[in-house]
Image (cartoon, helix red, strand yellow):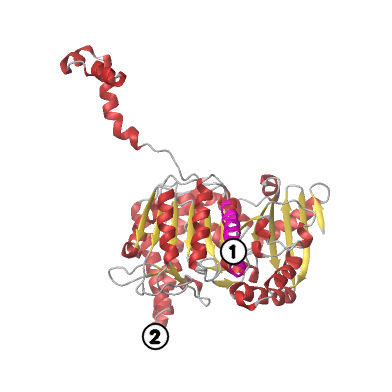
Amino acid sequence: MRANLGAGQDQLESGIERVIKNQSKTVWKRFLGSQQRKNLNIPDSLLKREDGLRSELYFIKKQLYLNQIKDEEKIALFKAQMSTVESDLEELEKWYAQKYPAYFAQRSQSFNLKEVISSLQEGQGIIQYVLGDQNLYAFLLTRSGIQLRQLTTKEQVEDQLAPLLERLRNPGLGGYNQKAAEVFGILLQDLLEKESLNQLVVIPDGPLYFLPFEALVDSNGDYLVEHLEMSYTPSLLLWKEQRRASPSDKRLIGVFAPKYYDESVNILNRGSYGALVGASYEAETIADLFPSEVFIGDQANIGKFKTKAMDYQVLHLAMHSTINNIDGEFSSLIFAPDQDGTSELYVSELYNLRLNADLAVLSACNTGSGELVRGEGLVNASRAFTYAGVPSLVASLWEIPDKNTSEIMVNFYRGLKDGLSKGEALRKAKLEYLKSTDNSRLKHPYYWAGVVLLGDTAPIDLKGTNYWWIVAFFPLLLFVVLLYINPELRKAVGHPVRSLFRLNHN
């Protein structure tokens, strides 16, 4: 079914708004809260209390999950403690709501689909998938109208998607392009055939979260990346807030690239321990392109990250990671060991961070994949950074290859430096990789499609304004001005202004 703006539109819009309203708002609320807090003058004592409660909650969960406690009495005790801490956090949240009513006011605003449609540019579209108990539905929003369709049965999409995802992660299996074309036919072909889009925002559902749509093959045999700038978001509510997030007042990139205990082994992907040559190359090249603070080797430890993370406009983490498909909150990023030997930073710890970044690049394996929770989406590292208020993320959907990923990342930053949008910079980086790769085997999407953009796609100002020279030379400038306007001072110091002018003219 296709509907255009105008007569008969209200019923369709209200139906879609009900779908959006009934979706989980957890990520949206946490992101909105993190953004709003930046403008509130919350006492340090309260922030410390909240941090303490969240740290205690993390500790209890860690004891229950990671330590595999078998003692029933200990389990009951920890669960009771967890309930108490969660109640304390709820009470603190209620206090915030009373003390800072504006903090919660925005959460109660109703969602207006017309506003979203009017905000779209020509050539821009948003597609949201809804996986019901029996069928897969999709609606496409563009400036010219809304399309709403029942695409296929739930069983069929799962049957078609499974072999495609298997071939994405295992390039040696063969038959990828055929499967990718079949899935394109189900998910996008009818929706896009009458549209002239150059940018598409995808809101997945169910197993579609694991699919990079730019790696699908269209009816002409082309990868979608060749014609479309792609990005992803868990919900329209979140996307709307990500686009209007307050820009960071920081002007540095923080780069963290640990080295690992077995540097004698060069690892081909970022899901196993060993030397990541490509990650080190990323770190060094980014530092050459932009004002950066780079932490390599032992300096890239958890303590340093927690201390410095809020100081950057962009966070770039080039490292190993682990994925936990059973409890996504215990997936982790692998830093260099701290003084106490701790190297894993779990997703549940990341929830507690306060960040000022406009962009986080999680150049590690599976940072955009993880545990799929019905109604919530994926629980993973990228979700944790969204909780912390970061409006744009670059993350990975599988164990990305080290060397190929570093080439794409470096070209992505070059595109940002040229003023491209984040989405277009990543698209061009992937196209540059495909163009520069002679080996047809390495053109398989496994090598380039695993890195995706989440959230806001707008260009990012990584140059900023350099005020340091004003600060450094202001005293001298003030002295010269005073000499010029004060005759007595000029006599006292022997007319240095005239001498200075004579020197400048020689």
For label 2, the SS is helix
- The tag on residue 61 is none
Residue 368 in the image: x percent, y percent?
A: 54, 66
Instruction: Give the spatial CA distance, label 2 vs label 1.
Output: 62 Å
Q: Is residue 435 magenta?
A: yes
Question: Is 81 positioned to the left or the right of 11 in the image?
Answer: left
Label 1 CA crowd tier, 10 Å (few <14, some 14–19, many 20+): few
**Residue 158 appears in view:** yes
The residue carrying mark 1 is 438
Boundaries of the magenta span = 425-444
**Residue 30 appears in view:** no
Residue 141 in the image: x percent, y percent?
A: 72, 53
Q: Quadrant of the C terminus?
A: top left
Please determine whether, in this image, residue 349 is positioned above or below residue 292. Answer: below
Looking at the rendered structure, the number of numbered marks drawn on it comes to 2
Q: Main secondary structure of the magenta part?
A: helix
Question: Is 78 positioned to the left or the right of 127 in the image?
Answer: left
Q: Is residue 69 magenta?
A: no
The amino acid beneath tag 2 is Glu
Between 417 and 56, the one nearer to me in the picture: 417
- What residue sits 36% from the left and 75% below the top? 262
- The tag on residue 73 is 2
